[in-house]
Image: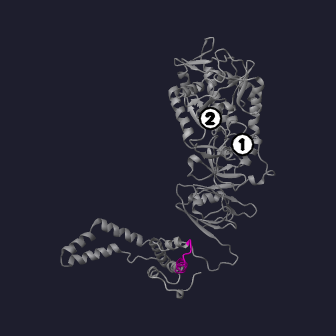
């Protein structure tokens, strides 16, 4: 399509545009020829060419191409300063001017040359001009054998940032290889080192016959620049995976895992942490970093498959504590998984117990600091509910173990239903009181779901206000169809809160607030409700004793029962067990050391849950789009 210059003479604009750069291979000449060709079709009024023709004629594009041609012309030239001793030359000129006939111009020039700022500028010029900024590479030997493998020289400048590389010894050949390059590290950012590269020299020292510890010792003694001579891997890995965000549903401590390839490169995490998975190429060990430290070098975490297997083998059967070194009784044999045992080195500078109390169904209250805090039906229901469901929930928890839950950033649209607010906490910590005060703060905006019951309606009650009064058959149908978030039997009657009751509140455009036992959280975690779980935690024991010193529990018989030390200790222990076993489901935590402050924090947290982006399971979003 591009014709010769003789086919048609260029226009005046074209000639003016092509005056710069080389006429043989410059971009300006190519554009001029394209314009000539387009001019033929443009005159024929062909559709779609006018926009392209006008774009190529724009002055800014022509100017950019002129600059590009000039850079192409001089990019191969090595620029050498005209003078290496400008400061001395300036002194000579000043001496000559001193002997010359004095005039106002000479005085002004001499004053400029003798100024301290001008002398400092020339001094800097000489320092830069006399310095050679070309990289100093060792000369290639003349007698390179034809069978010699191509090598790459990698020069990295050590700083406070991690190099982000592990090395391992290949037992079959004795070679030292780059085992993995961590995302976010200095080596990964340089783009010069890859997994599988063979180390030949480190800082000019041959590594043949050395083990990884000796190489690390060499690097530890180096200062400033680190130079690697490597034989590139035959296949350079290309990571085209999309980054995935997950919520950790378990704990992991690398120092307690004897199978991790490099303990120093492990990334510890706790339940509920949001992790960014940046590399899943290794089937057993992924690279990840915490969302709170997204700029740091990535670390190793067990893959989903590996953590599930560890859980099946009761690897983490007891709650892990970072300050206690646990010795696992179970190890993975090499016959079962040979590639788990990799000697990589980092290149770096019981079932809870609940006691049931026979409490009144309708009036269970306690007084704190002179205020009557109404607990209502919930506490008595929760006490009895634990007896019937504890074993089944414990079994299902082990059977459906999920190490990581894929999450996405979710922003609720104003037209969407509000998220369900779930309050969780041990009895006596003030969960019911916080729920009550939140609803009283704005009853037009907040409401609790009306529970279901099979007992008879009393004279002062209305159906749909205190309870939904249903038959036992209807209640059991709701349970079997999994439409009950919580349910239990109390004094021969069934009680529970249904999904339909919650949806009835949400459909009215209100925020539904429930307090549940943590064992029931999993039932609410659906795309239909999108719950936001807030854990109400008691303060430290010393403060708890002070704040509950005058608190009393009052039953319907008006018998005062003060909190005993063992009651407070039970509350603290139960809160710790809840956090240990169900902390992965908690979106927010409030320490109730002051009721008024806790109410303010609760209101703020509920507003953020509805108005600000939050991390939620990806399944909740995908279910909405089906």
Residues in magenta, as a range: 36-48
Q: Position of residue 338 (x, y in %)?
A: 78, 54
Asked if residue 215 lies in the magenta stretch, the reply is no
Mark 1–mark 2 Cα distance, whole angstroms, equals 32 Å
Residue occupying the point 67% across, 15% down: 458
Local packing at callout 1 (Cα closer than 10 Å; few below 14, some 14-19, many 20+) is some
Residue receiving disc 1? 402
Q: Judge whether residue 452 can be spotted in this image.
A: yes
Establish if 393 lies above or below 402. Answer: above
Looking at this view, name the residue that lies furthest to the bottom: 6
In the depicted view, which residue is nearer to us: 528 or 264?
A: 528
Disc nearer the start of the sequence (1/2): 1
Element type at marker 1? loop
What kind of colouring is applied to the model shown?
Answer: one colour
Q: Quadrant of residue 533?
A: top right
Residue receiving disc 2? 507
Q: Position of residue 518 (x, y in %)?
A: 67, 32
Residue 69 is left or right of residue 514, and the answer is left
Q: Quadrant of the N terminus?
A: bottom right
Establish if 26 lies above or below 116. Answer: below
Residue occupying the point 53% across, 72% down: 52
Q: Position of residue 157 (x, y in %)?
A: 53, 61
In the depicted view, which residue is nearer to us: 477 or 327?
A: 477
Q: Judge whether residue 594 can be spotted in this image.
A: no
Q: Position of residue 47 (x, y in %)?
A: 56, 72
Establish if 605 lies above or below 96. Answer: above
Q: How many marks?
A: 2
Establish if 400 lies above or below 490. Answer: below
Element type at marker 2? helix
In the depicted view, which residue is nearer to us: 505 or 140?
A: 505
Looking at this view, name the residue that lies furthest to the right: 335
């Amino acid at each position: 399509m591009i014709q010769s210059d003789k086919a048609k003479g260029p226009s005046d604009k074209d000639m003016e545009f092509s005056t710069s750069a080389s006429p043989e291979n410059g971009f300006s000449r190519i554009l001029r020829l394209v314009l000539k060709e387009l001019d033929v079709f443009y005159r024929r009024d062909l559709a779609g060419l006018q926009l392209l023709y006008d774009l190529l004629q724009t002055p800014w594009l022509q100017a950019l191409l002129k600059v590009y041609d000039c850079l192409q012309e001089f990019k191969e030239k090595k620029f050498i300063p005209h003078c290496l001793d400008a400061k001395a030359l300036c002194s000579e000129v000043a001496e000559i001017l001193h002997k010359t006939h004095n005039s106002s111009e000479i005085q002004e020039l001499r004053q400029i040359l003798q100024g301290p700022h001008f002398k400092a500028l020339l001094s800097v010029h000489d320092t830069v001009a006399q310095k050679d900024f070309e990289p100093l590479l060792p000369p290639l030997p003349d007698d390179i054998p034809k069978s010699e493998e191509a090598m790459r020289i990698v020069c990295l400048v050590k700083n406070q940032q991690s190099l982000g590389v592990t090395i391992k010894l290949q037992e079959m050949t004795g070679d030292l290889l780059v085992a993995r390059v961590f995302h976010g590290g200095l080596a990964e950012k340089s783009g010069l080192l890859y997994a599988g590269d063979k180390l030949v020299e480190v800082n000019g020292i041959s590594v043949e016959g050395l083990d990884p510890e000796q190489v690390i010792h060499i690097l530890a003694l180096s200062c400033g620049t680190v130079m690697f001579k490597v034989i590139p891997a035959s296949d350079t890995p290309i990571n085209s995976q999309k980054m995935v965000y997950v919520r950790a549903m378990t704990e992991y401590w690398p120092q307690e895992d004897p199978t991790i390839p490099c303990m120093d490169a492990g990334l510890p995490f706790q339940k509920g942490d949001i992790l960014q998975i940046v590399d899943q190429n290794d089937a057993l060990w992924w690279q990840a970093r915490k969302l709170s430290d997204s700029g740091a070098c990535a670390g190793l975490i067990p893959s989903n498959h590996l953590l599930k297997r560890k859980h099946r083998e009761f690897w983490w059967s007891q709650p892990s504590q970072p300050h206690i070194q646990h010795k696992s009784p179970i190890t993975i044999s090499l016959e079962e998984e040979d590639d788990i045992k990799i000697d990589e080195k980092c290149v770096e500078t019981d079932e809870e117990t609940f006691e049931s109390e026979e409490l009144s169904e309708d009036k269970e209250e306690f007084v704190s600091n002179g205020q009557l805090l109404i607990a209502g039906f919930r506490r008595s229901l929760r006490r009895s509910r634990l007896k019937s469901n504890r074993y089944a929930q414990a079994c299902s928890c082990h059977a459906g173990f999920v190490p990581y839950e894929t999450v996405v950033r979710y922003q609720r649209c104003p037209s969407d239903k509000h998220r369900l607010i779930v309050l969780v906490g041990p009895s006596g910590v003030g969960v019911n009181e916080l729920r009550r005060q939140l609803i009283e703060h704005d009853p037009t905006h907040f409401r609790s779901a009306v529970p279901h019951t099979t007992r008879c309606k009393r004279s002062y009650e209305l159906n749909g206000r205190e309870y939904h009064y249903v038959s036992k058959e209807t209640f059991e149908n709701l349970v079997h169809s999994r439409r009950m978030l919580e349910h239990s039997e109390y004094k021969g009657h069934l009680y529970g809160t249904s999904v339909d009751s919650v949806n009835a509140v949400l459909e009215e455009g209100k925020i539904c607030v429930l307090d549940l036992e943590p064992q029931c959280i999993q039932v609410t975690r659906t795309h239909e409700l999108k719950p936001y779980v807030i854990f109400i935690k008691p303060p430290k024991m010393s403060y708890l004793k002070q704040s509950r010193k005058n608190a009393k529990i009052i039953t319907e018989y008006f018998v005062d029962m003060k909190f005993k030390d063992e009651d407070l200790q039970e509350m603290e222990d139960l809160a710790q067990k809840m956090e240990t076993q169900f902390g992965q489901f908690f979106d927010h935590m409030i320490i109730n050391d002051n009721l008024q402050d806790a109410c303010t924090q609760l209101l703020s947290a509920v507003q953020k849950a509805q108005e600000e982006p939050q991390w939620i399971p990806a399944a909740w979003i995908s279910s909405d789009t089906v």
